[in-house]
Image: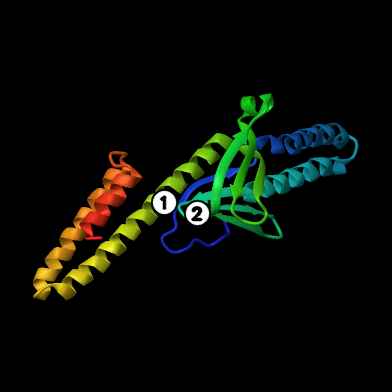
Amino acid sequence: MRTPLQKDEQVLLVTHRSWLKLVVPALLVLIGFVASYFIGFIQYYGWIAALVGVLYFLYAYWDWKVDIWVVTNLRVIDETGLINHYAKESPLDKINNVSYDQNIWGRIFNYGHVEIQTAAEIGATDYFNVHQPKKLKDTITLAQSEYKNMQLTSQARQMAAAMGWQSTATAGTAQAGSGAGHNIASELEKLHQLKQQGILTEEEYNRAKNKLLGQ
């Protein structure tokens, strides 16, 4: 991957187009060797056919190698181009829906079409002939879920930190305020965990949070 990663960004999945794209170049290599074998008995330059086939296969292979889709904990990257470099990014928080479909041949050889609906003006982004389309779709969905959890946790910690500062300001001493802030932070994180586990509904979580914050 030639796109630089951001701070704290981690690669979750790298996938390519279907390997079927290399079938025709591989057949041309075979044909080139067969042709060069028979032509070579008469003229030595008959092996040029084999060399041309090999060079074409190497070009096709490296073109396939750099044509990738990458899922990280922050975004989805569509990257291609052996000589010229093209890259398109879809931030996880801008993705509204991910779907995939496969025809009969796609199910046999494990490739298909993946569609990403984003909040951008262009609407949908389509990826065709993707190897392991279900895995790509599931990885994006899981990354989105973890990203949202990370955001909620960050918000809870920021709120707890702010309440800790307020408690410090209103308490009689800095030590007492620090203890109050620590307790609020701890309780907020517990409430957030209960909500993520499905024990608390959104309404129950907000009611408990407001009660804890004295709102």
Q: Residue at x 67, y 60 (%)?
A: 85
Question: What color scheme is it?
Answer: rainbow
Secondary-structure class at tag 1: helix
Provide the residue designation for mark 1: 148
Disc 1 to disc 2: CB gap under 8 Å: yes
- Which amino acid lies under the numbered mark 1 shown in the image of this protein? Lys
**Upstream in the sequence, badge 1 or badge 2?**
2
- Under mark 2, the amino acid is Asp
Say which quarter of the image contains residue 87: bottom right
Dividing the picture into quadrants, the one containing residue 167 is bottom left
Which dot marks residue 93?
2
Residue 132 can be seen in this image: no
Q: What whole-number distance in Å separates the C-alpha atoms at marks 1 and 2?
A: 8 Å
Name the foreground residue: 205 vs 140. 205
Q: Is residue 173 left or right of residue 112?
A: left
Question: What is the quadrant of the N terminus in the image?
Answer: bottom right
- Check the image and report above or below for 108 versus 66: above
Q: Position of residue 208 (x, y in %)?
A: 25, 50
Residue 99 vertical position relative to residue 165 in the rendered view, above or below: above
